[in-house]
Image: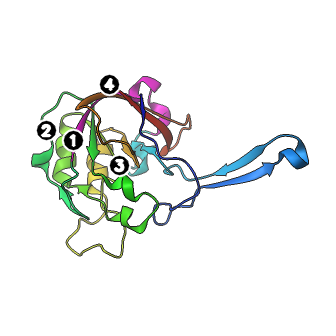
């Protein structure tokens, strides 16, 4: 099995989101045991977006069965796309998979400003995935463009890729890693924390 999860540690959050904080609460020296306080957003680190994240009447994570987070996944190599470049619909294959893993290669930049200049799904690409009932996961912070000083005026406004997928009731996996070298078809287990919310950090693993 291969771990596709970024460590949930203090670091660069998505712009506007609270950072992850892991703060000692009890120590071995003072208390004879260790307890840490963990604070994070529902979209910290590797995480699952539920439809309620951006859809007014969308389902929260509590509406999903745990089996819904076991996916027959197809890997799509998009490492030839550059900074802030949209992936067009023609790049999305016809597939009977229920998850498309979009490998951008941008996990290399995790924790840096360049990570926010990742490729993203065009609205048409996301709609093509949704029409096939295929959820999306990627090694980047968002299926839409992320805020950055390098953003251009011709980039899509709002979150059209999110709306296409979440509006179809499909979850989104973001901030994945270790997608390089995976076979074209893998089984992905992406189990979010059991919280009835708009999303949650997840441990995501792949097996051939």
In the rendered image, residue 30, in percent from the top left (x then y), is placed at 90, 49
On the question of residue 141 being in view, the answer is: no
SS class of the residue under badge 3? Answer: loop
Observer-side mark, 2 or 3, equals: 3
Q: Residues within 10 Å of mark 1 (few under 14, many from 20)?
A: some
Q: Which callout, 3 or 4, points at the residue further toward the start of the chain?
A: 3
Closest to the observer, 44 or 161: 44
Q: Name the quadrant of the C terminus.
A: top left
Residue bounds of the magenta highlight = 60-77
- For the residues marked 1 and 3, what is the alpha-carbon distance in whole angstroms? 11 Å
Q: Is residue 108 left or right of residue 151?
A: right
The residue depicted at 20 percent of the width and 55 percent of the height is: 122
Q: What residue did someone put label 1 on? A: 76
- Asked if 48 appears above or below 43 in the picture, the reply is above
Q: Which callout, 1 or 2, points at the residue further toward the start of the chain?
A: 1
Closest to the observer, 163 or 4: 4
Q: Which callout, 2 or 4, points at the residue further toward the start of the chain?
A: 2
Quick check: is 48 in the magenta stretch? no
Q: What residue did someone put label 2 on? A: 93
- For the residues marked 2 and 3, what is the alpha-carbon distance in whole angstroms? 18 Å
Closest to the observer, 32 or 65: 32
Q: Is residue 38 left or right of residue 125?
A: right
Q: What residue did someone put label 3 on? A: 139
- Asked if 42 appears above or below 194 in the picture, the reply is below
Residue closest to the far left = 90
Q: What residue did someone put label 4 on? A: 208
Q: Are marks 3 and 4 in contact (CB under 8 Å)?
A: no
* Residue 77, picture quadrant: top left
């Amino acid at each position: 099995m291969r771990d596709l999860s970024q460590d949930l540690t203090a670091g660069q959050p998505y712009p506007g989101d609270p950072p992850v904080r892991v703060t000692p609460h009890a120590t071995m020296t003072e208390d004879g045991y260790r307890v840490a306080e963990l604070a994070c957003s529902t979209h910290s680190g590797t995480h699952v977006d539920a439809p309620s994240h951006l859809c007014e009447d969308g389902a929260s994570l509590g509406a999903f069965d745990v089996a819904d987070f076991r996916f027959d996944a197809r890997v799509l190599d998009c490492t030839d796309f550059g900074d802030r470049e949209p992936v067009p619909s023609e790049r999305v294959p016809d597939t009977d998979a229920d998850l498309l893993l979009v490998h951008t290669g941008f996990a290399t930049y995790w924790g840096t400003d360049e990570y926010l200049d990742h490729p993203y799904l065009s609205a048409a690409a996301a709609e093509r995935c949704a029409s096939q009932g295929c959820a999306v996961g990627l090694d980047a912070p968002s299926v839409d463009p992320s805020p950055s000083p390098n953003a251009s005026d011709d980039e899509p406004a709002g979150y059209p890729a999110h709306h296409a997928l979440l509006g179809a009731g499909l979850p989104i996996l973001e901030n994945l890693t270790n997608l390089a070298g995976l076979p074209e078809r893998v089984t992905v287990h992406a189990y979010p924390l059991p919280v009835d919310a708009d999303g949650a950090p997840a441990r995501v693993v792949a097996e051939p």
